[in-house]
Image (cartoon, rainbow, N blue to C red):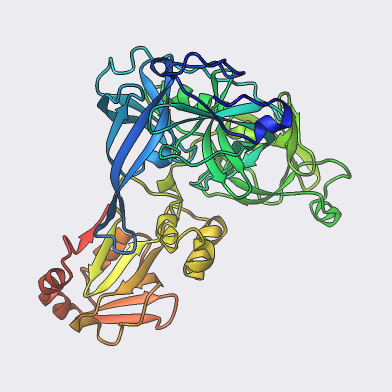
């Protein structure tokens, strides 16, 4: 085994600990025998849903990762690993023994999931990991990975920043550790535990191999998730439901009648039917404190462990759904208090759902016109750069949905594309249209559309759109007569799927 370096050099060189070689001298990370590892391999197979062709699934996938063994016979992994899964399997690293497993709790916003083996004795002999809740900037964390032989590979890194960032689901901000670490890819790198003094400090969130910078889901977020997971009704992480902007600009402070050097954040939007809306928070308010925590002009408070940190940590990590937070607010220069009862906002409560996993998308095919409800999952079909590559009108709807649809309680129905058919001659080049009315009826959901289509006007189905050509017309009798042929031609399992 390579000698473990001291000082800065230790951060630059990954080193391996082989459980079978007990004659080697131990280093700072004590040698751990394979049978005592707090890790199991997790093998996942599944199929994602195709939001461009919503009647079908994408190609099957397989993923291989590591899971951190927890008390009470549970294994912790990232939610990304088990999204759209068909089968989950646990594998003992030292023996290769396998058993089926079930996903018991999953939170795509926090990117965490708990799985449990079908065989309740399968994890016997593996020491559960406790959580290390005291990680601060300057600490060293060790990334645990396994070679194909079962040998443990430990790579040390330095915690350089602790901040609030967005996780893959892009809903709110969560506490994140940023770590400088020269980690190497292995076939189980999809979920990587990061350990401090043999306690679980974090899980891999994302890694940039070029800069060797890793973002990790920290133990406080994991602890919050596990506490909720222990309850009979998992409620998720709470959200306040308002957008904000720093008050560094003196002109903004004057506009809001804020006294000099008050600090706080300017409320730019309030989501419909959110915790903030129900509490009476208004656009133009300045939130100066959350409970006893004063906010500076950047929206930071002084955390007892981390120092200056954005106040959203007080909502997501330090509070639970059902808790009430007291916000100190300036409204038109006058101080007041707002009692915010926190709630989790489920994806179906948004006008445009921020994510959609484990369930097929709704759709309707009418005479060759394909209708769907706009979702961020649909926009993500344009790839990692979807915010620039996807139809920009739809990206705009997603980004500003609170301001554009302040009434909430609706969906944006789109005509995504056209299947060539006798009924759609002349419409072949149209796509990405926003549906406003069908047969004179306002459309607020795909269900509204299917109901409106049952009542043709003068024998025609009239679809009004926000974009050109403004109106599409289909012969209702022809659509009905050729529906079966259309379904057979394009091998559609059904002409509609309505949630």
Of 326 and 243, nearer the camera is 243
Of 134 and 17, nearer the camera is 17
Query: Where residue 317 sits: x, y (%)?
Result: 58, 30
Q: Across the whole image, how many numbered discs are drawn on residues?
A: 0
Looking at this view, name the residue that lies furthest to the bottom: 426
x 58%, y 19%: residue: 29
Asked if 48 appears above or below 85 in the picture, the reply is: below
Of 182 and 393, nearer the camera is 182
Evaluate whether residue 315 shows in this view: yes
x 37%, y 75%: residue: 431
Evaluate whether residue 458 shows in this view: no
Looking at this view, name the residue that lies furthest to the right: 260
x 25%, y 20%: residue: 119
Q: Is residue 291 left or right of residue 60?
A: right
Query: Where residue 102 sits: x, y (%)?
Result: 29, 30
Q: Is residue 214 left or right of residue 126?
A: right
Q: Quadrant of the N terminus?
A: top right
Q: Quadrant of residue 373?
A: bottom left
Asked if 394 appears above or below 65 in the picture, the reply is: below
x 60%, y 21%: residue: 133
Asked if 317 appears above or below 196 in the picture, the reply is: below
Q: Is residue 481 left or right of residue 153?
A: left
Q: Is residue 296 left or right of residue 45?
A: right
Query: Where residue 258 sits: x, y (%)?
Result: 83, 47
Q: Quadrant of residue 278?
A: top right
Query: Where residue 166 sits: x, y (%)?
Result: 57, 45
Of 489 and 78, nearer the camera is 78
């Amino acid at each position: 085994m390579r000698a473990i370096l001291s000082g800065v050099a230790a951060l630059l060189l990954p080193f391996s600990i082989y459980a079978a070689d007990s004659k080697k001298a131990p280093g700072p990370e004590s040698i751990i025998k394979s049978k005592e590892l707090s890790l199991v391999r997790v093998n996942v197979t599944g199929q994602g849903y195709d939001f461009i062709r919503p009647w079908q699934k994408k190609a099957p996938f397989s993923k291989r990762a590591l899971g951190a063994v927890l008390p009470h016979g549970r294994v912790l992994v990232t939610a990304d690993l088990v999204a759209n899964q068909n089968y989950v399997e646990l594998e003992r690293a030292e023996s290769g023994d396998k058993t089926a497993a079930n996903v018991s709790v999953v939170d795509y916003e926090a990117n965490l999931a708990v799985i449990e083996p079908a065989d309740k004795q399968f994890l016997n002999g593996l020491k559960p990991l406790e959580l290390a809740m005291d990680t601060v900037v300057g600490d060293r964390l060790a990334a645990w990975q396994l070679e194909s032989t079962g040998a443990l590979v430990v790579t040390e890194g330095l915690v350089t920043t602790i901040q609030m960032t967005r996780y893959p689901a892009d809903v709110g901000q969560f506490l994140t550790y940023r770590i400088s670490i020269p980690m190497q890819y292995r076939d189980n790198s999809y979920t990587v535990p990061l350990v401090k003094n043999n306690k679980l400090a974090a899980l891999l969130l994302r890694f940039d191999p070029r800069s060797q910078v890793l973002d990790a889901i920290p133990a406080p977020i994991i602890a919050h998730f596990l506490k909720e997971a222990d309850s009979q009704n998992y409620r998720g992480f709470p959200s306040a439901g308002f957008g904000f902007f720093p008050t560094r600009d003196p002109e903004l402070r004057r506009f809001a009648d804020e006294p000099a050097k008050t600090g706080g954040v300017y409320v730019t939007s309030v989501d419909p039917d959110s915790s903030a809306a129900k509490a009476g928070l208004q656009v133009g308010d300045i939130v100066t404190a959350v409970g006893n925590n004063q906010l500076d002009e950047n929206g930071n408070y002084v955390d007892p462990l981390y120092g200056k940190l954005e106040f959203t940590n007080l909502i997501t990590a330090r509070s639970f759904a059902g808790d009430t937070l007291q916000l100190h607010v300036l409204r038109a220069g006058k101080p007041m208090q707002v009692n915010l009862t926190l709630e989790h906002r489920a994806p179906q409560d948004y006008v445009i759902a921020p994510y959609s996993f484990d369930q097929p998308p709704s759709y309707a095919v009418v005479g060759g016109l394909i209708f769907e409800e706009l979702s961020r999952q649909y926009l993500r079909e344009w790839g990692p750069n979807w915010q620039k590559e996807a139809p920009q009108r739809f990206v705009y709807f997603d980004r500003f949905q609170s301001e554009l649809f302040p009434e909430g309680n609706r969906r944006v129905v789109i005509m995504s594309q056209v299947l060539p058919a006798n009924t759609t001659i002349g419409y072949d080049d149209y796509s990405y249209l926003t549906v406003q009315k069908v047969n004179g009826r306002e459309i607020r959901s795909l269900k509204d559309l299917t109901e409106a289509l049952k009542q043709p006007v003068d024998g025609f189905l009239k679809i009004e759109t926000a974009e050109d050509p403004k109106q599409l017309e289909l012969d209702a009798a022809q659509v009905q007569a050729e529906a079966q042929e259309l379904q057979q031609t394009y091998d559609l399992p059904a002409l509609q799927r309505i949630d």
